[in-house]
Image (spheres, rainbow, N blue to C red):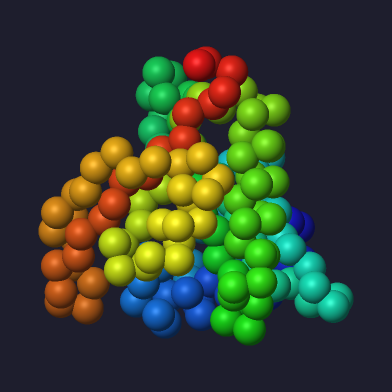
Amino acid sequence: MAPDDWPDVRRIYEEGIATDLATFETAAKPWPDWDASHLPAGRFVAVRDGRIAGWAALSGVSDRCVYAGVAEVSVYVSADARGQGVGRGLLEVLVAASEQQDLWTLQAGIFPENKSSVALHERCGFRVVGRRERLGKLKGVWRDVLLLERRSEKIG
């Protein structure tokens, strides 16, 4: 992913926001804010027919040194490319990149209603480790979030 990809990345992110199934965010942040909150080495786009069809990125979970090897994953696929393997390809590339960066844990927070995202993550080696009940409100409604994680094969 390059800065020039931001208009398409933002469009796809906004499609995800509009579903109320992908994030607590209600609007995409400007590029400088998004850029500052994601790790530089863990950003990818999927291109189909010359157009960005999805994106994936890693963000740190804490500034504390003990969490240096833990990152949160984000995977978003455009509405017209869902169900075609784009998300899986992106998540597999993201997992491989995390292994090269010596990250030992990847985590994802997913609304339980987003069954396709939960299934995608499970196919890529993530497991549900808990349910965070009424973690936050989205448009005035309390929402639960499943916490999924994938541990690096390097640490066993």
- 21 is higher (above) or lower (below) than 3: below
80 above or below 32?
Answer: below
Q: Nearer the viewer, residue 59 or 118?
A: 118
The number of numbered discs placed on residues in the rendered structure image is: 0
What residue appears at the point 47 percent right and 35 percent down from the top-left corner?
150
| Residue 133, horizontal then vertical, whole percent | 14, 54
Tell me residue 116's x, y (percent).
45, 66
Location of residue 124 in the rendering, given as x and y in whole percent from the top left corner: 55, 45
| Towards the viewer: 149 or 116 | 116
Q: What residue is at 15 percent from the left and 76 percent from the top?
A: 140
The answer, for residue 69, to whether it is visible in the render is yes
On the question of residue 3 being in view, the answer is no
Along the viewing direction, whichever of 105 and 30 lies nearer the viewer: 105
Q: Quadrant of the N terminus?
A: bottom right
- Asked whether, in this view, residue 151 is left or right of residue 11, the answer is left
The residue most toward the right is 50
Q: Is residue 96 above or below residue 32?
A: above
Residue 12 is drawn in which quadrant? bottom right
At x 33%, y 44%, the residue is: 128
Image side of residue 68 versus residue 142, left or right:
right
**Residue at figure coordinates x 66%, y 65% from the top left:** 85
Residue 136 lies in what quarter of the image? bottom left
Where in the figure is residue 16, as x and y percent of width and height? 47, 74
